[in-house]
Image: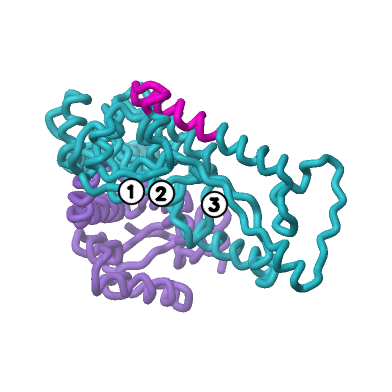
Chain colours: A purple, B cyan
Amino acid sequence: MKFKAESNASIFKRLFAFVIDILIVDLVLLWPFDKVLSSVFSGKISASSLAEIMSGKYYLIFSVTLVFFLYFVLFEQRLGQTIGKMLVNIYSVSKQGEMSTWQAIGKNLFLIPAIPFIFLWVIDPVLILFRNESLSEILTRTKTIEQKAGWQSWMAGKA
Amino acid sequence: MDGRKSVSRLKVSVMILIGLFILSFMLAGLMSASVKLGNVAKIKINGIILTEDANLWTQSVASSDFKEFIGKAEKDNAIKAILIEIDSPGGAPVASAEIADAIAGAKKPTVALIREQGTSGAYWAASAADKIVAHPLSMTGSIGVIGSYLQFSGLLRNYNISYERFVGGEYKDIGSPFREPASAERQFLQGSIDEIHYYFIGSVAKNRNMTFEAVEKIADGKFYTGMQAKKLNLVDELGGEEKAEELLKQMANATEIYYAEYGKKETLFGLLSKVISQQSYFVGMGIGSSFVKNELEVRT
C-alpha cells in the first residue's frame, strides 16, 4: 500500500484507534462469552463447575486471546487497517511493500498474555512515546502511518 | 474506482467480523456446554444474626442481605430448592424473626442444615425451613431470650460519685448503668423479654407444627445436642450434607445437586471503607469511653 502524502501516525490517534478496537472486540466479538462469564460472577454457577472453569481458565484466556489476535491480524493483513484505525485514518504498512501474513502476526504478538510477549506491554508504549515506533514494528519492519487527505496532502506536497 | 474499492473493503470488514463472531460463539458454546448451572441455592447463616452487617472483626449475617438472597433464589428459574447452612449462636430478635419469615415465605422447598451450632435466633430461622438436618453432635435449641447490662451504681457509690437524674418521662433512662433499676422498671424489662420469648415460642410452634405448650416446655433456654433435639422434634433428620442433599433431591425432584452459592461479595473498596470507618469510630469515641459505654442488649 503506497501513499503519496504520509507521516508517522500520532500517538493520540494510535491510542484512540486501539481503544476503539478493544471496545469492538470486547463488546461485539466476545459477546457470546458474556453469558458464561456473568453466570460465574453472579454466583449462579455451582461450586464444582466454578472449580472446573477456574481449572479451565487457560481455555478462556486462550479463546479471548485468539479472537483478539485474529481481529488485529486479519484486518491489518487484509486491509492494512483495523476498524479503530479506519476511524482515524491511520494504516499499518510494511516498509518493504505489501504486508505479509507473518509481518501481521509478528507485529501483533504483544496481544498474547504470556512471557516474553508481555514485556512488550511496557517496552512498546515507551518506544512509541519517544520514537513513534513500537519494538514489534521495528522487528517486523512495519510502521503505522497517517494518510494525509485534502488540504493536508496539498500542504505536505508544498513543503 | 474508489467507490468500488470502498465497497470491497466494507465487504472484507464485514466478512472478518462475521467470521470472528462465529468463532467466538463456537468457543463460548464449548465452554458453556461444560458448565453446570446450580439447581440448589446455598445460603449461609454464619456468625451473629443482625439486621445490618457488624464490624470488620465480627462474623455476622445481616437479615437484610439474607432476605435479598432468598428473593433472588426465588426469582431464579434454575433454582429448584434452597439449602440454608447454619453455624450461628443466634442474634438480635428482629433480625432472627426477619430471617425466619423470609424462609417461611419461600415458595421453593427449603432445608436447614445445622453444622456446629444453630441455637436461639439461628434455631428460630432453621425452624422456618421445610426440613431441618442436624449433626448428632450439633448444638441447637436454646429457645430463650437474654437481656442484660452491667450496673455500676455500687462502684460509683464507693468512689463518692453520684448520678444526677433529669428525665422527661419516668422510664426514659431505663437500663442506665449508673443506678439500680426500680422495681417497676425490672417488671417492665422482664415483661418485654417475656413478650419476645412468647413470640419466639409461638413462631417455632407454628413453624414446627407443634403446640405452643409443647414448645414452651422445652423453651427454657437450654441447648440440645442433635440427638436430643431429634427426640424433642426440634429437628427432622440427623446427618450432614449428604443427608441434606438426599432430602433436597427428593424435594426438588432432581437426580443431581449442584449448588449455587448466594453470598455477599466483599469488594476491595468496601473492605477499605470498613477499616477506615472502624478506625474513625474508635478515634472519635475514645478508648476510655468504650469501657464506660454500656447498654441494655437483647439477644435471642
- SS of the residue at dot 3? loop
Q: Amino acid at mark 1?
A: Gln
The residue pinned by badge 3 equals A150
Q: Which chain letter matches label 1?
A: B
Chain part drawn in magenta:
B196-214
Q: Quadrant of residue B108?
A: top left
Q: Is residue A36 above or below residue B289?
A: above
The residues tagged by marks 3 and 1 sit, at their Cα atoms, a distance apart of 79 Å
Q: Position of residue B270 (x, y in %)?
A: 52, 56
The residue pinned by badge 2 equals B89
Q: Is residue A29 visible?
A: no
Q: Amino acid at mark 3?
A: Gly
Q: Position of residue A27 (x, y in %)?
A: 38, 43
A80 relative position to A129: left or right: left
Q: Position of residue B248 (x, y in %)?
A: 21, 31
Q: Amino acid at mark 2?
A: Pro
Check if mark 1's residue and mark 2's residue have beta carbons within 8 Å: yes
